[in-house]
Amino acid sequence: MSTSPGAPVLELPAVESAGPRRMILNMGPQHPATHGVLRLIVELDGEVIVSVQPEIGYLHTGIEKTCEAKFYQQVVPLTDRINYLDPLSNNLCYCLAVERLLGLEIPDRAQWIRVLLTELSRLNSHLIWLGTHAMDIGALTVFLYTFREREEILRLFEAVAGQRMMTSYFRIGGLSMEPPLDWLDRVQHFITTFPEKIDEYSNLLTGNPIFMNRLKGVGYLSAADAIAFGVTGPPLRASGVDIDLRRDMPYSSYEKFQFNVPTSTVGDTWARYVVRLVEMRESTKIVQQALDGMPAGPVKANAPKIVLPDREKMKTEMEALIHHFKIVTEGFNVPAGEVYQGIECGHGQMGYYVVSDGTSKPYRVHMRYPSFTTLQAIETMCKGRLIADLVAVIGSIDIVLGEIDR
Amino acid sequence: MTSQPPTLTGKQAVLEGLPDHPAIKALEAWNSQAFTDARFDFGELTLTIAATEIVAACITVQKAGYNFFEDMTAVDWFPATPRFQLSYHILSHAFKERIRLRVMLDEADPTVDSITPVWPGANYYEREVFDLFGIHFGGHPDLRRIMLPDDWQGHPLRKDYPVEGYR
């Protein structure tokens, strides 16, 4: 089988005539290719997919309800658990939303470290996507390579936050603390060597005929369908819609960074692969710019009633001790209002809708996560294709069940 | 250090403050009666629409350039009336801007038309609100519980549903 690059194969078999030969296949919830507990009820005519019905909710833990019973600052660790592959984007989105309600101004250094870490977090997310996606297709080796670099990133997270995955490093009003002294050098070392690692992955996959044949022309999604279904992030850009909130609606100083937004007009799984691979290179550039222009100064906003004082101050100053006690026991009141903060995370557009009634606990926190929306387009992408393509499509939309079920 | 963008409260103030806003112009030309209230705070525009007219309002803003359905959810203002607030967040790829359409629903009959004919992507969001708030969406193609089991009693995100312990 040969495919010309860029031309989606769309000769759909005639499924209407199938009739009684159809079979219902239950895929998941425990299936290695579903990346979690996703259940797909697939209707098949031979090997051809007639319909796909996702059943979700197996990981539902009611995080939105739990948020309503916590103080604002106690919600931050809950956000990590939603998209556990891109933890710092969750933290960032929630903190930005609450900071807008409070009207807090975040110091430059905190904003730049936020950008740096969110990009590392995006790399983390993309590395896991690449490893597992390739593994689903049958290219097992890449997984070992991507997890080698992911380990480096997790060590960098551990150095700043004390946690590898559930970082909770961004706090309302800035960062939880200043990064360790040699940390920026360690990031520099990682980011200098990283582009050649991307070349390595690319060498393993981009020219690989098996990988290409499994992806090219598979899971085609048109730009109109992508917009109708609310698809965001790399799948949307791979369908030719040039939108990236980092560039178009900048937050946390992204307007000060120069980067390209890769797009493709092909709209198949191969295009999504290429877009994400280029995005990794662009993220590397952003991290480099953040390191080069890292401003000096505090990493917490000057708001003693909202931001916890430094340990040293808390132990020596009466005022700081009182503020610390009040924040920990009573929280802080947030002005009444509602805010929707959208950011571009590794999977697409993430959004936090925070409603405050003026008390110290959020009245309502709603999270918009990209995988939840993108999952709706799966039937459009798979209909009339072989069941083996379903695995490629699930991989290419980069699904995380934690963020679907919340 | 604090800084807040200016706040405009009430439809009249928003109409005067943002006279050239494409969504406001389109909604005002479409049906001034159904476009009941407006508010601009925290840099976000909230436009309140009569519950019966939400689908037509969505078509209107879609034509005005707000082409991308981003998010939809509900807020329970129990025990206030009207009890439920629906918030639709619509993004414009052309203007790089977001608006919020707001619909208020009474507790007695929490039913509103589904916007899935306009944006099929609203399907899961409406199912989620149906599941967790018990709000019905007329004309929805597949209105079932999405997060919880089908035999679950109650709607957890309502304010009269306890956070922990037995119901």
Image (tube, helix red, strand yellow):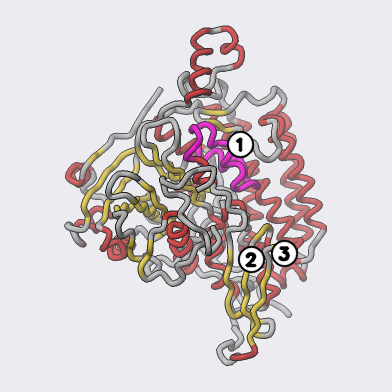
Disc 1: which residue? A116
Q: What is the distance, in whole Å, between disc 3 and disc 1 at their CAs?
A: 35 Å
Residue A297, image quadrant: top right
Marks 2 and 3, the one that precedes in the sequence: 3
Where is residue A261 shown, x and y percent of the image?
A: 55, 52
Disc 3: which residue? A31
Where is residue A326 shown, x and y percent of the image?
A: 48, 19
A63 is higher (above) or lower (below) than A206: above
Work out whether residue A164 or residue A235 is closer to the camera in this orientation and state it: A164
Disc 2: which residue? A39
| Label pair 3/1, CB-CB below 8 angstroms | no
| Label pair 2/3, CB-CB below 8 angstroms | no
Badge 2 amino acid: Arg
Residue A45, image quadrant: bottom right
The dominant secondary structure in magenta is helix
Marks 1 and 2, the one that precedes in the sequence: 2
Q: What is the distance, in whole Å, between disc 1 and disc 2 at their CAs?
A: 36 Å
Badge 3 amino acid: His
- The secondary structure type at the circle numbered 3 is strand
- Provide the residue span drawn in magenta: A68-94
- The secondary structure type at the circle numbered 2 is strand
